[in-house]
Image (cartoon, helix red, strand yellow):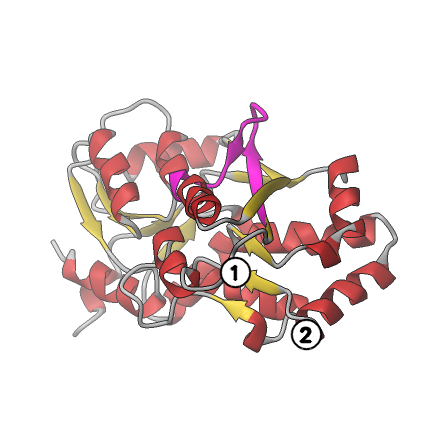
Amino acid sequence: MGREFLKPFRVIVTRPARDAEAWVTALTERGLQAEALPLIDIEVLPVSAALQQVWRDIDGYAALMFVSGNAVNAFFSSNHALALEERASTAIDLIAHQGLRCMAPGPGTVAALLAAGVPAAHIDAPAPEAGQFDSEALWAVVADRDWRSQRVLIVRGQSAGAEPVGGAGRDWLAQQLEAAGALPEFIAVYRRSAPQFTTQQRQTLTESASDGSVWLFSSSEAVGHLPPGDWSQGRALATHPRIAEAARAAGWGVVVESRPTLADIVASIESMQP
């Protein structure tokens, strides 16, 4: 009986398309009726002169911080675009043998790093049982390191308007690094933008604002990409307090917070039984 009541309503997964499909599969396997409605489009940026310079200077960094799995994928795939496979191997060799660290705010980014070939022993991230996965939790893991005069590259995205994105937490992390004596730098490797909705997606937007569907939000930016509407009867599940705050500000009637792990999200959805 535990999950039978979940079948009549949908879980709307708002992550970018590739991530959303993976979450739909995982939620469906847990007995939920889930569908993807991506609220953020991801586009890998053309390889810039700045990114070329980063790869030439890769051995000059003490650490690389990736804001998301998309940042990992775009960063390492840039070498293929440059036909610099040998340089990519050199980067992995540096990570594995010469102390170059890779930092991740949560398990999704860790998984992307592992898939890219980064050894687990060279990844710094909040523990799986951490209360939250964000820049603050990551800093708690690495704050005691000697950062004086150490170059740290923060790999992130930019908005469609060319402004960098990655959340206030990323800027906060850069400030902490700088205060500790580090030399933080930024490189944008992908662009995030609002989607162009299909007719079917617009129908889903209208119906699921009041039909009992649970919207899964993992980004405040995704909340901001919703079209104007009345969300007072809508139910949102947010994977971070800042995202929950954005949903409440947008007028969502029910907003529940959850850790961003599959087990916690499923449990939170179950707690939202009508």
Label number found at residue 103:
1
User: Height in image: 74 above or below 43?
Assistant: below
The quadrant in which residue 122 appears is bottom right
The quadrant in which residue 164 appears is top right
Measure how far apart labels 2 and 1 are at the Cα level: 14 Å
Q: Residue shown at 57%/62% (left/top)?
A: 102
- Relative side of 59 to 203, left or right: right
Q: Nearer the viewer, residue 41 or 205?
A: 41
User: Height in image: 121 above or below 237?
Assistant: below
Amino acid under disc 1: Met
Label number found at residue 261:
none
Q: Does the magenta run of residues contain 35?
A: no
Q: Which residues are magenta?
A: 153-169
Q: How many marks?
A: 2
Percent across and percent down for residue 190 are 62, 41
Q: Residue shown at 37%/71% (left/top)?
A: 128
Q: Nearer the viewer, residue 247 or 50?
A: 50
Q: Nearer the viewer, residue 191 or 5?
A: 191
Mark 2, secondary structure of its residue:
helix
Percent across and percent down for residue 183 are 57, 45
For label 1, the crowd category at 10 Å Cα-Cα, with few meaning under 14, some 14 to 19 and many 20 or more, is: many
Amino acid under disc 2: Ala
The quadrant in which residue 49 appears is top right
Q: Which residue is mark 2?
A: 96
User: Height in image: 82 above or below 133?
Assistant: above
Mark 1, secondary structure of its residue:
strand
Can residue 192 be seen in the rendering of this structure?
no
Residue projecting furthest to the left: 274
Q: Residue shown at 17%/36% (left/top)?
A: 233
For label 2, the crowd category at 10 Å Cα-Cα, with few meaning under 14, some 14 to 19 and many 20 or more, is: some
